[in-house]
Amino acid sequence: MSDDEELEKIRRRQMEELQRQAMQRQMAEEEEKQREIEKARRQQILRQILDPSARERLNNVRLVRPDLADNVENQLIQLASMGRINRIIKESDIIDILSKLTENKREPKIERRSK
């Protein structure tokens, strides 16, 4: 094999690698764009069904328990998409929902034993 053939082979491999990387980058960008669209859709639905204080409460919960906030949001979005929410959800409603979701959790009990 001549040097020219080897050089051409190396160039071809490099070109294929660059094309593959470009394709992966493009797919990642498309996935990110889809995530952003979905996030915007979710936020739009939540803006329609939650009053500002309820949204603020849910955002505060997200700081401490993101899984719980996601769970509540998912449930609310699902109910809204099924047409089962016929009024604006207030902060007190969010508090009720949160308390019902967390009431089954056992609180750790700390006992002090004196000597």
Image: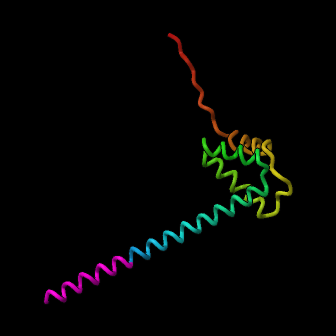
Q: Is residue 28 above or below residue 42?
A: below
Q: Is residue 67 shown left or right of residue 101?
A: left
Q: Nearer the viewer, residue 29 or 49?
A: 29
Query: Which residue extends farthest top?
Result: 115
The spot of residue 61 in percent (x, y) is: 65, 43
Question: What residue is at 67 percent from the left and 46 percent from the top?
Answer: 59
The spot of residue 72 in percent (x, y) is: 69, 51
Q: Is residue 5 above or below residue 69?
A: below
Q: How is the image coloured?
A: rainbow
Q: Nearer the viewer, residue 65 or 8?
A: 8
The spot of residue 28 in percent (x, y) is: 49, 69
Q: Quadrant of residue 24?
A: bottom left
The spot of residue 71 in percent (x, y) is: 66, 52
Total number of numbered discs in the rendering:
0
Q: Which residues are magenta?
A: 1-19
Query: Which residue extends farthest right?
Result: 86
Query: Which residue extends farthest left?
Result: 2
Is residue 11 on the magenta stretch? Answer: yes
Which quadrant: the N terminus?
bottom left
Question: What residue is at 34 percent from the left and 81 percent from the top?
Answer: 16
Q: Is residue 113 shown left or right of residue 42?
A: left
Question: What residue is at 69 percent from the left and 60 percent from the top?
Answer: 42
Q: Is residue 75 above or below residue 38?
A: above
Q: Quadrant of residue 17?
A: bottom left
Secondary structure that dominates the magenta span: helix
Q: Is residue 69 shown left or right of residue 48?
A: left
Question: What residue is at 64 percent from the left and 52 percent from the top?
Answer: 70
